[in-house]
Image (cartoon, rainbow, N blue to C red):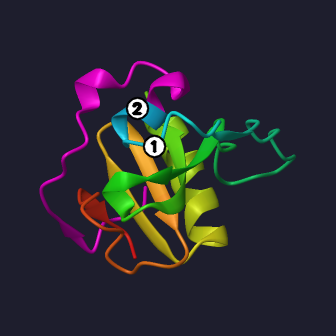
Amino acid sequence: MPVPLSVGPSPVDPAALRSSNDLPSVFQCPTAVTPIRIPAATPATGATAPPAPEAVVCASALADKEAVYLWYTPTPEAKLGALTMALATTKYVHGGPNWVAAGMLNPTMGTIGGEVYR
């Protein structure tokens, strides 16, 4: 599991996350726009990390309305898969007990907070 560079407070309530369907509301995405869903990755033969779970992309008010990739990660394996994908494909990555968020534009990712991986 990657080690965060720092850890800070986050307004994201992990208790409100029960599935990937909860990500848009918990991360305060606008209801007028349908979030983009990215299916879970298929396991690769010989992969050293588990595949990433389903992701949701939406403009989070917590990230100053930047469109961010969001993963619900209820298990350590899901979190490792999401972190591996996020670190390989985005610039800024944050996480929490059961979520990973990643973006490309805002180095601080607004007020998302939590574990900062880069």
Please, what is the three-letter code of the amino acid marked with disc 1? Answer: Cys
Question: Which of the labelled discs sits on residue 25, or is there none?
Answer: 2
Label 1: how many residues lie within 10 Å, few (<14), some (14-19) or many (20+)?
many
The magenta segment is 1-23
In the picture of the structure, the residue carrying the numbered disc 1 is 29
Residue 45 placement, left or right of 67: right
Percent coordinates x, y for residue 48 in the rendering: 68, 54
Asked whether 8 falls inside the magenta stretch, the response is yes
Separation of residues labelled 1 and 2 (CA atoms): 6 Å
Give the secondary structure at mark 2: helix
Residue 75 seen in the figure: no
Residue in the picture at 36% in, 65% down:
64
User: Image height check: is 20 above or below 67?
Assistant: above
Query: Magenta span has 22?
Result: yes
* Above or below: residue 69 compared with residue 89: above
Q: Are marks 1 and 2 in contact (CB under 8 Å)?
A: yes
